[in-house]
Each structure stands twice: as C-alpha cells, then as structure tokens.
Amino acid sequence: MELYHVLLADDEDEIRAGISRKINWEELGFTLVGEAENGAEALELCEQLRPDVVLTDIKMPFMDGLELCRNLKQSLPAAKIIVFSGFYDFEYARQAVSSGVFEYIMKPINATELKDVLTRLREKLDHERLEKRDMEALRRQYEESLPILRELFYTRLLDGRIPSDEITERALRFGIELSTQNWTTVLIHINIQKSLSYDELILLSVRAFIEQHFQLNISSIHTLLYNDMVALIVQTEHIYPLIQEMQRLCFLVQSYLGFVISVGIGRLYNAENLSISAQEAHSALDHQVLIGDTPVLYIGDIEPKASSKLSFDEQDLHSLENAIKLGSENDVRSVIKMLMNRVRETRFTLAQCHLFFLEIITGLVRLARSGGEDVENDFCTNFTELVSISDFDSLGDLNDWLCNQCLILQELLGKKRNDSACKTINKAKDFISCHYQESDLSVDTLCEYLHLSSAYFSTLFKRETGKSFIAYVTELRMDMAANMLTQTDEKTYLIAEKIGYTDPNYFSYVFKKHFGVTPSKYRAGQRI
C-alpha cells in the first residue's frame, strides 16, 4: 500500500524538528512531504503538494491553525487534519472539532501519543480507501438502483437518436423529470491502465462516488455510463459554479479512489439539443491533449460557439476538425486519405463525388469562420471562385489539394489560438497592474473580469508567463515595494498598505523571503 503524504506546520523550528526526527514515518505508513512555519505558507504548500494529512499548530503568525482548517475544508476536502496547541483552552478544541479535524493534541507533544493517533488515522484512511473500492458492492448497488431502460434513454438522448417531439413523452414513461431549459453535458474520462481488469467496475465506482459527493445546489442532475466514460446531464442556470464543483471532485476522486480523471463540459442548451452539448464536452476532452495540466475544461473557454452541424457525416466532420485543430500534419493527411479512399471504394457517381467534395469544403469554411474573422478572411479567399471536382485530373490530385488547404487552415488556427491566449494574458496583466494595491485581489476576481474559469486561466497563465498567479502578483508587489523603499521615505507599514498587504508583519515576512533581507535593511543598503 502506498504511503500517505503528511504536511507539518508550526512556527517553532525546534518543535518541527523534534516531530520530524522522533516519528518513524514510513513504519507508520506515512511520508513527510513538507514543512511550513506559518499558516499562510502551509496553505500555499497544501495547494502545491495536496497532502493526505496536515499536522498544524493552533497559534501561528499570518494565519492561525483554525483559519487554515477552514480554508483546507474548501480547497483540500479529503485531507485529515491533526491540531496541536500549548493553550489549554477548550474553546480552541471545540472550534477545531467543528472545523472537521481528526484529532486535537495538547502540547508538549508526546511522541507515543502522536504515534497512536497516526496509527488510528492510517487505519481510517485504509478503511475509507478499501470501502470506496469495493467493486462488488458497487455492482450490486448499480443493479438494484439503475434500470437498464433509463440508462438506454440517457445514452440515446446524448447520441441525438431520440426525435425531439418524443423526448418529453419517453422521459415521463421512464419516470424522468426532464424540463426543456438550461441543460449541459459533463463527460468524465478515467485514465485506466490497460492492464487493469474490471474497468467497468471502475467506471461504476467513479459514478457512485460522484453521486455521493456532488454538493452543488442545482436544479437537476442525472448520471450514467456513456461510451467508456461517466456522463452527467446537469440542469443549471450558471456554468462556472459547475466547473468549480467538478474541479473539487477531480481532487476527491484522486485522493479517495486513486484514479486520475479528466472532465469536459459543453454549453447550456434545451433538452432537445443535449446531443450538441455532449459533442462539445467530447471536444473539450480532446483539447486536454493541447492544454494539459488542468483536469476540467469548458468548451466555452477554448472555442467560440460552433455553428449548426452539417448534414455531412458527423464522425467525418469531428475527425477532420480534430486533426486540423489538435493533430499533426500526418493526422491531417490520414483523415483526408480516409475520405478519398471512401470515394474510391464506394464508386460514387460524379455528382455524388462533387457533393461530397463540397461538404468537405463547407466544413473547412465553417471551421475557419469559427476560428475568428481574420482567419476567415485569410483562409476563405482560397474559395472566392467556385471549385469543382472536375478541376482535378485524379483523386490523388484532389487529395493533395485538400491536404494543402487543411494545413493552411491548421497554421492559421494555431496562430489565432496563440494570439488569443497572448491577448488574454496581456489583459490579465493590465488588470493586475491596476488592482495589485487591493488586498482582496484574487484569481477568482480576475477570472470574473475575464469571463474564464479559474482552472483554465491558471493553466493558461502559468504556460504563458512561467509563473503562477500568486507568484506573479507577489513579484509585482515586491518590485513596487522595493522602488518605494528606495525612492521615498514612507513608513514600511504605509508601503505595505499601498501594495495590498493589510498586515505589515506579513509584508515584511514576504519581502525578506523574496529579497533575503528585511525592508529596513534593504532601504539602508540601497542608500549607502
């Protein structure tokens, strides 16, 4: 069984060293992955390391242990927390218990007592993990609670195989409440090792886990197994709270079940058009290859709203779009070759071949238009004159011409995507420059201004700048502070307020961590 990760937070160096030295972590089933000397640093490390267990003191500078517990309850809900304190105050113990801590230990810390607590905690963690992985129990639960006909209805609904005028009647027949407004599809892909058996049961376990832990207050939600994925059909007024909830569930699934999942979310539609939302959610999952580093992607964050679908075969169009938007030159050539082989093998008439050719051209034009105005102008000028299949001497010539047009479009869309990302980051930097003085500046505030989900923005910002949002803001504030220290005679606490720090002591701590000296010594050194 793998070791559970532990983070230790205490402002006293001797206590941290003593706990670290006296506990045989591996023997107890744990490994110490990080240490913090205050609550703010502990919260930042927790976001990076995602520990299973947090050992924290109650009294620490900048952020005390109770506030840390409250923050972790939101950002790291699966973590078990052990709190210790030198203050014999039952009020602290009561607040700690109400914050969901596993154990409250009084200082001075006894190594034997801490070992006993860790032993009990390991048993609880093992029990929870084994309980969640009880595949046979989940199989029985599934067979007893989810009728096959209801599953079939949802699957056909997402596939678009139910006539729109029959959806309401069939839903009522199966006892399903399915109003017509504001539905979206969420697709969850589980990264299952090919060598792992019982993959259907793994899908069931993730589905049951999502049903049990989904907490967002929404109008309605239905879950099902769909094309080797877990699908959620969700009725909601607002998409971004759903994105945040799925982000939380991704971390929980990995913490409890040990599975890494990826989530794609489509736009909001009425019930009759849920198949379009499902296609968009699948496209969002396809973008995981390009975006990376974020488990949840909303199609509205990465693509403008698509035009209505063509009568051209949906799978062909999907393959062609994916090859152009996400694939390599070889991928593009492979799709075009497949289309041309179909023409060759089925022996279409000239009229049928011309229609097939025009449908491909129409798909390329629509894809160009969806990429933006400048892409449309640059690409669609190639089709200002009517092109006929009779203009080509052979299917080989037609194949080469189509490949060339697709590769031109691929290059234009890639440039447009990079330009769009650059504009977004520049807009974010401008916002930060105007608001870094505000103490409540956060990535959520910025994302609300940009109309992006925080998960997608954080990945994009890190990719484009090489820094996290917090690191970028901190560096900007430190540069401004250093400038004011050398160019003005203002007091340190006033400089702290002007760059967004309400606590001058915490400002001094961050400044020293950034520059290696205190603000006063920095000022004195620069003026020598």
Image (cartoon, helix red, strand yellow):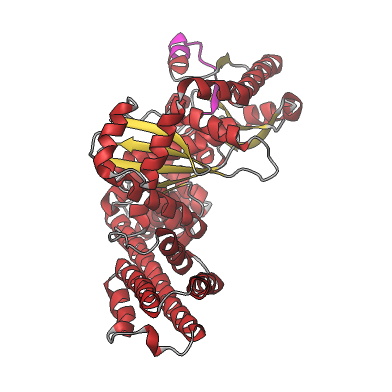
Residue 515 vs residue 32, the one in the foreground: 32
Q: Quadrant of residue 524 in the image?
A: bottom left
Q: Is residue 51 visible?
A: no
Q: Is residue 81 magenta?
A: yes
- At a point 40% along the width and 30% down the height, the residue shown is 150
Residue 328: x and y in percent read 53, 70
Q: Quadrant of the N terminus?
A: top right
Identify the image quadrant of residue 390: bottom left
- State the image coordinates of residue 97 (x, y, percent, origin top left): 47, 15
- The reply to whether residue 321 is in sight is yes
**Residue stretch rendered in magenta on the structure:** 78-94
At x 32%, y 80%, the residue is 378
Instruction: State the residue in front, 19 or 102.
Output: 102
Q: Position of residue 475 (x, y in %)?
A: 43, 55
Query: Where on the picture, by quarter, is residue 116?
Result: top right
Q: 172 or 14, which is in the foreground?
A: 172
Does residue 306 appear to the left or right of 109 in the view shown?
left
Residue positioned 61% across, 27% down in the render: 133
**x then y, percent, for residue 374:** 29, 75
Q: Is residue 455 above or below residue 225?
A: below
The answer to whether residue 240 is above or below residue 144 is below
438, 386: nearer the viewer: 386
Figure check: 212 above or below 482:
above
Query: Across the whole image, how many numbered discs are drawn on residues?
Result: 0
Residue 235 as seen in the image, left or right of residue 158: left
Q: Is residue 492 left or right of residue 262?
A: left
- Residue visible at 45% across and 34% down in the picture: 224
Whether residue 340 appears in magenta in the rendering, the answer is no
